[in-house]
Image (tube, rainbow, N blue to C red):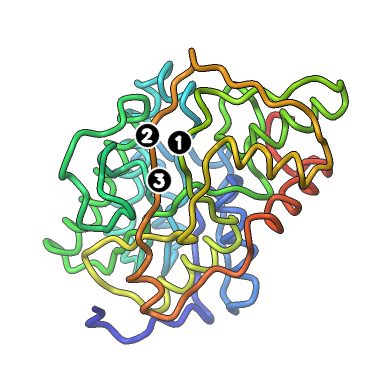
Amino acid sequence: MSAHPPYDLAGKRVWVAGHRGMVGGAIVRRLASEGCEVLTASREELDLTDQRAVLGWMHNQRPQAVFLAAARVGGILANDTRPVEFLRDNLLIETSIFTGAESAGVEKLLFLGSSCIYPKHAEQPIREEALLTGPLEPTNEWYAIAKIAGIKLAQAYRRQYGCDYISAMPTNLYGPGDNFDLKGSHVLPALIRKVHEAKLSGGPVEVWGTGSPRREFLYVDDCADACVFLMKSYSGEGHINVGSGDDIAIIELARLVMDVLGYPGEIVTDPTKPDGTPRKLMDNTRLRTMGWAPKVALREGIARAYEAFLAGEGRNL
């Protein structure tokens, strides 16, 4: 699967693009034990959609490895109401960083995608080969198309210029640094906030849609560990799924969050809201075969995420 020797991060200058995001922050935490110099650039320092600025920054800083975790992200509502931003901004970020990396002689780059790249009705569990075999979920197709473009950019640079660029496709992530804004968050952080507020008020917990869709979740520090593992040990054109291997119905997830937070209240569903993709479980056989497996179970991860929420370690709190 890999034609290259293992890539050693020790002593390297490693840029984590998107270090203030949930995934980027977890990658920075994980890199602390790799003996490398971590480079970061805040939004105030560098506009990642500005190709000229990114090119200049990369030539000045000379990173040897790049984790491309920067992206405009959000849940169903955000994707559905701001399609221009989700398509345009992500395309600009990707093209700026890929162009800069090749120009500045970056040795290795990992592009972080999303499980929404797969067809809405893909066979479950979803194998990497399912990419581009059917229509996307309409509520987030703008973001998905941008992420598919990122995968193809990595492949194109590998084919045309011989660049060692790889792609990882994580499932639904959660944990410290998550977005808890109910207007823009994903389902698990939204449920944590809803249950917390219901616990304070004594009211019901609202679940969007029917509650029947099934989703897979991975604690963000497990994802970061997988990304570092792939950066060090994988080199190939094909993208690699990163997941837990288990899924759960949204209604059951709500009950689990309520149990972890200690709130025995009522759940009400709102069928007028969209369900999204009926099921999304990824096949992570390739990654497990390489020797990687997640460490944090869902119940433990929810408890950790709630602690982070209470400590203010998130966005839009």
Q: Nearer the viewer, residue 101 or 77?
A: 77
Which of the 4 image quarters holds residue 261? Answer: top right
**Which quarter of the rendering shows the N terminus?**
bottom left
Q: Is residue 226 left or right of residue 259?
A: left
Disc marking residue 277: 2
Q: Given contact means CB atoms under 8 Å apart, are the residues at marks 2 and 1 in contact?
A: yes
Dot 1 or dot 3: first in sequence order is: 3
Q: Is residue 301 left or right of residue 248?
A: right
Q: Amino acid at mark 2?
A: Thr
Q: Nearer the viewer, residue 150 or 44?
A: 150
Dot 2 or dot 3: first in sequence order is: 3
Farthest residue, direction bottom? 5
Residue 4 percent location from the top left of the image: 27, 82
SS for tag 1? loop
User: Which residue is rendered at x = 33% and y = 63% of the image?
Assistant: 240
Q: Nearer the viewer, mark 2 or mark 3?
A: 2
Q: Amino acid at mark 3?
A: Val
In three-dimensional space, the C-alpha distance between marks 2 and 1, rounded to whole angstroms, equals 7 Å
Disc marking residue 213: 1
Residue 205 percent location from the top left of the image: 71, 25
SS for tag 2? loop
Q: Which residue is mark 3?
A: 54
Residue 259 percent location from the top left of the image: 76, 44
Which of the 4 image quarters holds residue 192? Answer: top right
Q: Amino acid at mark 1?
A: Pro
SS for tag 3? helix
